[in-house]
Amino acid sequence: MISIRKKPIPTTALGLALHGSRLDGVLVKRSNGSMQVLKSFSATLTLSPLTGDAELVGREIRNHLDQAGIRISQIYLSHGHWDHLSGVRDFPEATVHLPDSERRYLQTDRPPRVLPSIGQDPAIRWQTLHFDATPYRGFSHSHDVFGDGSVVLVPTPGHTPGATAMYVNLSTEHRLLLVGDAVWRVREAQDSSRKAWPVRWFADQDRSQTDATIQRIAAAMAEPGTIVIPTHDLEVQQKLGFFPAWIK
Ligand SMILES: [Zn+2]
């Protein structure tokens, strides 16, 4: 979850996708409560994202963004697990937003779920993310990133204490809901199948909160025009395709 700041307030957001060694990026601009695609770019990495040295892969991705003229100023994390925040060190100039509960979790849980070296890194510009008591699409609280309803964050606690989902409103009729690891696959919310029990035991911090969050996601998914995207759901990704397929 990344947004770009154009002074004085953020106006654009960046989506990145990796498939094999190909990096795709889409820059979208907020416009009257929805998002319009500003530009897209793709690049081929020389290092494998799966087997290459993580630090070097991160540096190579950063270089491609720099070459595309993209400057990251604000980062909104879905949660603090290692595979969702390891890239923040590649953007030391950016502000990284997390609820206080997630910051505490980062500082108290252990590897391999979290990386203490990142959670306690004083060089990272952490910023507390506050939710307003403003209901949004069935969620009790929300945070409107741009202040115009185009990108709205909602709390999805359970998998981790401060887990956060992001609505990206492509238009008034169509929206994406990025749910991080609240569910690993959409069908967990569709048929209440849940994650495999070893994963629940290892990764979900609070089972009853996770179940309540999944029920909210299931209700959100029933709303026409909402596409729920878990981070690790290959089926959803294959159905959506890569840009520009997913906006058609
Ligand atoms: Zn996770």
Image (cartoon, rainbow, N blue to C red):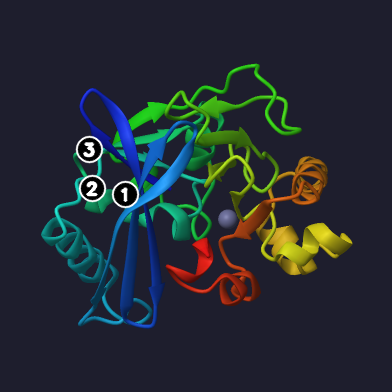
Q: Are marks 1 and 2 in contact (CB under 8 Å)?
A: yes
Q: Percent position (x, y) of residue 81?
A: 51, 53
Left or right of 15: which side holds 195?
A: right
Could you classify mark 1 by the number of other residues whose Cα lies within 10 Å: few (under 14), some (14-19), or many (20 or more)?
some
Q: Is mark 3 within 8 Å of ligand 1?
A: no
Q: Percent position (x, y) of residue 221?
A: 75, 51
Q: Residue at x 18, y 68 (%)?
A: 60
In the rendered structure, find residue 234 and report the number of the disc placed on it.
none
**What residue type is disc 2 on?**
Phe
Label 3 element class: loop
**Residue 81 vs residue 76, the one in the foreground:** 76
Could you classify mark 2 by the number of other residues whose Cα lies within 10 Å: few (under 14), some (14-19), or many (20 or more)?
some
Q: Would you name the residue on which mark 1 appears? A: 88
* Residue 213 against residue 193 in the figure, above or below: above
Task: Name which quarter of the figure residue 126 lies in.
Answer: top left
In the rendered structure, find residue 123 and report the number of the disc placed on it.
3
Ligand 1, by image quadrant, is bottom right
Left or right of 35: which side holds 205?
A: right
Q: Would you name the residue on which mark 2 appears? A: 91
**Residue 227 vs residue 159, the one in the foreground:** 227
Label 2 element class: loop
Q: Percent position (x, y) of residue 113?
A: 53, 56
Q: Are marks 3 and 2 in contact (CB under 8 Å)?
A: no
Label 1 element class: helix
Q: Separation of disc 1 and disc 2 at Cα?
A: 6 Å
Q: Earlier in the sequence, mark 1 or mark 3?
A: 1
Q: Earlier in the sequence, mark 3 or mark 2?
A: 2
